Image (cartoon, rainbow, N blue to C red):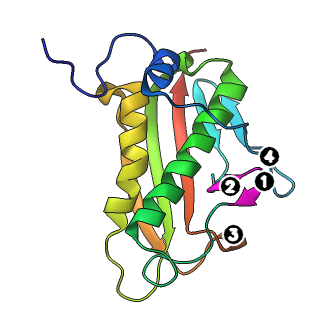
Amino acid sequence: MVSVKGSQPGGADRRLQDLGIQLPAAPTPFGIYVETVQTGNLLFFSGMLPVVDHKPKYLGRLGKELNIEAGRDAAYTAALNVLAAAKEHLGSLDKVTRVVRLGVFIATFGDFFDQPKVADAVSDLFRDVFGIQKTSVRVVIGVASLPLGVPIGLDVIFEVAE
């Protein structure tokens, strides 16, 4: 039997290990808010940005200062921060029962229309970690600017085991 990406046995923590992904330290707020809030079985995340060590990894807009590849890496970096924040809050990513919603906000310039290709970097990572059966609904929106001048902001909701 051929293994399909995202359908590997084991939980999300094992898949991260199998994929060779080491999560960064969970991000810390840039203001007066918290990174995660759980209510019932839903875990909400503050807008996750492509930051490393509390500093933006990328600055600029897609279609001007940044290309698709940089946008995809920025989105992937922000997604790793989601996973790190979830793991810190839950103790284990195995407690994620579903990725409910993924919102990808992309700072763009001019006639940049490849937002879905950039957002796929996040969808691909979540599929690989949680499995295809936990794929979320998704909204992808191009915006004029985002906090700190970063190109990507993620709005994510996970369903979790209580």
Out of 160 and 72, give the one closest to the viewer.
72
Distance of label 1 from label 2 (alpha carbons): 6 Å
At label 4, the amino acid type is: Thr
**Residue at mark 2:** 51
**Residue at mark 3:** 147
Of pointers 1 and 4, the one earlier in the residue sequence:
4
Of pointers 4 and 2, the one earlier in the residue sequence:
4
Labels 1 & 4 near each other (Cβ < 8 A): yes
Label 2, secondary structure: give it. strand
Labels 1 & 2 near each other (Cβ < 8 A): yes
Q: Residue at x 43, y 28 (%)?
A: 129
**Residue at mark 1:** 54
At label 2, the amino acid type is: Val
Distance of label 1 from label 3 (alpha carbons): 13 Å
**Residue at mark 4:** 28
Q: Residue at x 69, y 69 (%)?
A: 147
Q: Residue at x 47, y 85 (%)?
A: 64
Q: Quadrant of residue 25?
A: top right
Q: Which residues are magenta?
A: 50-56
53 in the magenta segment: yes
